[in-house]
């Protein structure tokens, strides 16, 4: 039988390791994985260059698209084009900072309607767990969100309230009963309230305003409640490496806890951030070089399950470059398009292989959200591919990125690895015509 597409590559990253292979695609799925010299008849045949590697399309489960309501920060069209340019074929959108936030089914339907004809990659949605919407969560779960996001302190936007201790316990109890998952921005409100306030141009002062202790206390609370109720919980954007021992201990006890970190925590360090450089502001903050290396050790040990962008963009004026005040600036790193190259640049220096990066940025996030057909080059999986040239290099120029606003902490940074092509269900993503689908829990 003729295949719709055949891709032949000397280097293919599969679940069983790297190999030379010929991949046959039919009806948007991988239908054959054969030796490289196998002749598979196809409507279209693509042969990769010697320096190119075929990776599965990446999965980014932590993206703030902000559409509708704050689409001037980032919208579905620009975000998904940026994702595709970075080799990402699936994103899961956070329930804030859109207006309305995704805290009930009506808001979810509004967001889906806005996204439907704009997306260049596949898109799923998280629901939000906020004060007062506990009764909405079962219907959101049935409507196909991949889980529920909660803040344990002020989220930064008034329409997405945080959970206090009692609300958190009630929410974890409920998600356990529905076999759902709670994903948590884990910083303790009281610890941060007791710290010096974030103000001024000194990065050291901003870092002191979000101490690692705040993360550790909040993570300990999530672990305790997750264990008590037999729930599933996920720690978002881990920046405090000192939390890793308690995470390891919880897992040894059988607590269903997963953890992510982000490229900016694995790349930058506090010692190198200039005063006034508010493009580096994010919460929790970028910590010391020693902390960064311990996060890398957590990845190597398997304590950190995946690496995702936490793409949290804004307009340039919200970064307050006019005054460089970390207390006034919006907190968030824009890096959706750059994650693969950023992580590969750092990983190769530490002796990791491309297969490790695929585990962290494709298979890991797909497994986290239960996407069985995503994040892997395997028979029956969606034919989502990233053609990557790992030894090519480029200099980041914000005005050349597909993000809506030219703001990024990576501007001017040299990176290794260039995404040459991205394929979604056997079709090349060109950025000219939206071809993505909206995903629900259980249908991917």
Image: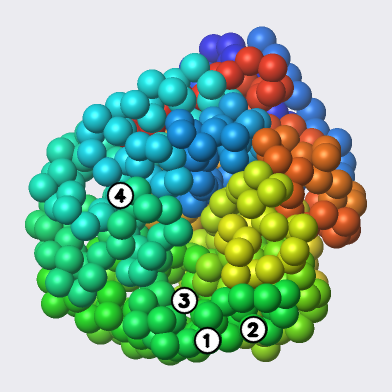
> Dot 2: few (<14), some (14–19), or many (≥20) neighbours within 10 Å?
some
- Give the label on residue 196, or none: 1
Report the mark closest to the observer, 1 or 3. Answer: 1
Q: Residue at position x 69%, y 28% from top?
A: 7
Is 197 rendered above or below residue 341?
A: below
* Residue denoted by label 2: 205
Closest to the observer, 298 or 31: 298
Q: CA distance from mark 4 to mark 1?
A: 29 Å
Q: Quadrant of the N terminus?
A: top right
Q: Residue at position x 49%, y 17% from top?
A: 117
- Give the label on residue 128, or none: 4
Query: For residue 354, which quarter of the picture?
Result: bottom right
Report the mark closest to the observer, 3 or 2. Answer: 2
Q: Is residue 10 visible?
A: no
Q: Earlier in the sequence, mark 3 or mark 2?
A: 2
- Give the label on residue 303, or none: 3
Q: Earlier in the sequence, mark 4 or mark 2?
A: 4
Tell me if label 1 and label 2 are in contact, CB under 8 Å.
yes
In the rendering, at what x and y percent does residue 249 appear?
34, 87
């Amino acid at each position: 039988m003729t295949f719709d597409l055949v891709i032949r590559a000397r280097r293919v990253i599969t679940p069983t390791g790297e190999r030379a292979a010929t991949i046959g695609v039919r009806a948007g799925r991988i239908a054959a994985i054969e030796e490289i010299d196998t002749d598979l008849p196809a409507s279209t045949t693509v042969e990769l260059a010697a320096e190119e590697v075929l990776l599965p399309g990446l999965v980014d489960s932590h993206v703030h698209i902000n559409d509708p309501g704050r689409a001037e920060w980032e919208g579905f069209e620009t975000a998904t084009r940026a994702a595709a340019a970075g080799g990402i074929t699936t994103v899961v959108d956070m329930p804030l900072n859109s207006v309305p936030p995704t805290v009930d089914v009506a808001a979810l339907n509004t967001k889906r309607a806005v996204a439907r004809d704009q997306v260049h990659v596949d898109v799923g949605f998280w629901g939000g767990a906020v004060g007062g919407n506990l009764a909405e969560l079962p219907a959101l779960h049935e409507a196909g969100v991949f889980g529920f996001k909660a803040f344990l302190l002020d989220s930064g936007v008034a329409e997405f309230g945080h959970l206090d201790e009692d609300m958190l316990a009630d929410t974890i109890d409920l998600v356990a009963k529905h076999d759902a998952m709670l994903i948590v921005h884990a910083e303790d409100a009281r610890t941060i309230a007791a710290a010096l306030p974030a103000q001024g141009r000194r990065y050291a002062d901003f870092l002191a305003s979000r101490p690692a202790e705040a993360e550790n206390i909040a993570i300990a609370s999530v672990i305790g409640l997750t264990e008590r109720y037999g729930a599933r919980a996920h720690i978002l954007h881990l920046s405090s490496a000192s939390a890793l021992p308690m995470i390891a201990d919880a897992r040894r006890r059988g607590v269903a806890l997963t953890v992510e970190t982000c490229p900016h925590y694995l790349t930058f360090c506090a010692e190198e951030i200039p005063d006034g450089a508010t493009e580096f502001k994010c919460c929790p903050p970028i910590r010391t070089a020693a902390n960064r290396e311990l996060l890398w050790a957590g990845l190597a040990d398997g304590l950190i399950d995946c690496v995702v962008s936490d793409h949290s963009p804004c307009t340039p004026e919200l970064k307050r470059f006019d005054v460089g005040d970390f207390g006034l600036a919006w907190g968030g790193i824009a890096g959706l398009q750059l994650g693969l190259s950023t992580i590969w640049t750092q990983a190769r220096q530490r002796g990791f292989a491309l297969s490790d990066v695929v585990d962290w940025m494709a298979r890991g996030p797909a497994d986290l959200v239960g996407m069985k057909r995503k994040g892997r080059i395997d028979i029956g999986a969606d034919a989502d591919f990233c053609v990557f040239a790992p030894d090519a290099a480029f200099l980041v120029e914000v005005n050349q990125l597909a993000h809506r606003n030219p703001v990024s902490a990576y501007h001017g940074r040299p990176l290794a690895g260039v995404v040459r092509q991205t394929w979604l269900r056997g079709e090349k993503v060109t950025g000219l015509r939206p071809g993505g689908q909206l995903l629900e829990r259980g249908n991917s």
